Image (spheres, rainbow, N blue to C red):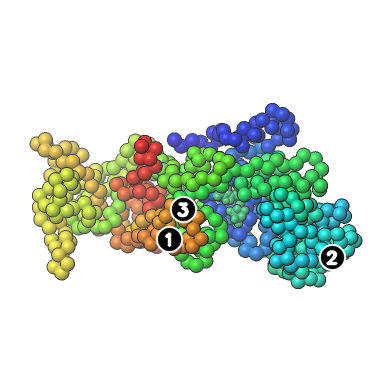
Amino acid sequence: MTQPIESPCTDFIRDIIEEGQRLGKHEGRVATRFPPEPNGYIHIGHAKSVCLNFGIARQYQGTCNLRMDDTDPLGESMEYVESIIRDIRWLGFDWENRLFYASDYFEKIYSFAVELIKKGEAYVCSLSADEIREHRGTFTQPGKESPYRNRPVEENLDLFARMRQGEFEDGAHVLRAKIDMAAPNIVMRDPIIYRIKREPHYRTGNSWVIYPMYDFAHCLSDALEGITHSICTLEFENNRPLYDWIVERLIEGPRPQQIEFARLNLSYTVLSKRRLIELVQKNYVQGWDDPRMPTVTGMRRRGFTPEAIRQFCAAIGVAKNDNLIDVSLLEHCVRDDLNDRAPRAMCVLRPLRVVIDNYPEGQLEQFECANHPQRPEMGIREIPFSRVLYIEHDDFMENPPKKYHRLGPGREVRLRNAYVIKCESMVQDEKTGEVAELHCTYDPHTRNAPPADGRKVQGVIHWVAAGQCVDAEVRLYDRLFSIEDPGSEEDFTKYLNPDSVEILTTCYAELTLKNAEPGSKYQFERLGYFCFDEKDSKAGKPVFNRIVPLRDSWAKIAKD
Ligand code: ATP
Ligand code: MG
């Protein structure tokens, strides 16, 4: 299933591009951009847009710019810029020397606004925000014209210049495009294009106290960069006539063609930046890189791979209607990629001590294990075996049902890559009565061989040798929300899954994991895929995050 990043895709956007190329539009050139506002970390929805924009540029030998749409000083920061750069690089995309900032165009955009005023197509309006809203009308009723709509050009120029000089308080005046207060599309009812905002900007500092509105800056930035296809999400469909109106008046030559697609919604998660910020700021999660977050940084820390994320984005394609994608498809892509690439290892999460009574004390054997069952080129490693071992607590049952193929009193099981053992007796905790230790015997003739007498041993369990293993912490993650569509709930934090993480602090991992590299990923046999957590691991106590369990609910859905 894993497809290389280069493989071409088809979808309605690419159809439009190819049709345009046949008609000779934009001289056959393809120039896209990914335009995030640096007011948060990017998430899987943004990754979809990144894959789409950069993927299209690659497919049609075009270019894709990275542009920070940083026109609203509130909430924007260099930290976010840096994170966006890091995350898109990690996803596998490159903008060469085309990193741009809308804030670099502020002077240019200001002069465009002045030009509109001079043409009599913009005016300074001195109504309050509430009054402007009241004047706007509704879907069924036309708006009312502002009493300031017919201010003379000279007065507008003067007021606008003084807005820039900082003479007025926030909200005292705004600059509006003079379009049509009766337009059926409310976006066209004299939209605000500049406002006063006495707020320092993370790049321009205190140079500006007026800032262009997103709608004004965005379309002009695209045009200034020579973007041919402005790909954006559906909520901007109504803004398209406004963008055309603005660019038509201010830019010569060919205009960017806007194409809208449905934003990604993912089940059991939220993808609105506002909500992700809330999760972080109110400490519902441990930060933007919390492995439960749908952010790129969170997914990276969890152990998702860029290949899997790109594969997911290719698999969901682009649609014209909003839909909710099952998160198990994303998990499936991750599993699919890791199954191929992750070396196998053994780790016991809830240890139960096992003593092999007939195994010589002090003896240590080294067993060779394949790192990957289907890929001999990934090599082998040696695993120590000794008299005292650990197995999973739930691989033993005191009163097992008939079909239980693991350990029980008098029962046999195979230790993965090692011997068949038989449970002879158990030791119970005096206070709790819980099983604290098993005493077993091993069959020395079963090392990598079936029992000589032909008896069947069906179960195979994982294990590690006591004293020859690594103390580890393992974190098991589940979905962050317990309902399918938390994004549609106003009070979405009510639906946080209280069991979204389980922390196991006394786990034993095989010795080879002592030197696990930051970010390295493994399949812990029978348990799932795990990633070494660089941030929280300590010398002698590595932390592993479970990326996904082995069970693939998507494969099951797809089969049914
Ligand atoms: P906001 O709600 O603050 O506007 P945003 O998620 O739209 O947040 P932007 O930084 O404006 O954030 O997004 C950058 C780009 O990513 C935009 O072109 C936007 O259309 C796209 N994008 C954002 N969310 C999604 C999503 N869920 N699916 C696909 N594309 C998305
Ligand atoms: Mg946006």
**Residue, disc 1:** 496
Q: Residue at x 13, y 61 (%)?
A: 427
Secondary element at image label 2? helix
Q: Residue at x 56, y 33 (%)?
A: 10
Residue that lies at the very extreme toward the front in this rendered image = 140
Q: Quadrant of the N terminus?
A: top left
* In the image, residue 431 above or below residue 43: below
Q: Is residue 238 left or right of residue 51?
A: right
The one nearer the camera, 14 or 395, is 14
**Mark 2 crowdedness (10 Å alpha carbons): few <14, some 14-19, many ≥20:** many
**Residue, disc 3:** 485
Residue that lies at the very extreme toward the top in this rendered image = 22
Secondary element at image label 1? loop
Q: Amino acid at mark 1?
A: Leu
Secondary element at image label 3? loop
Q: Amino acid at mark 2?
A: Leu
Is residue 216 in view? no
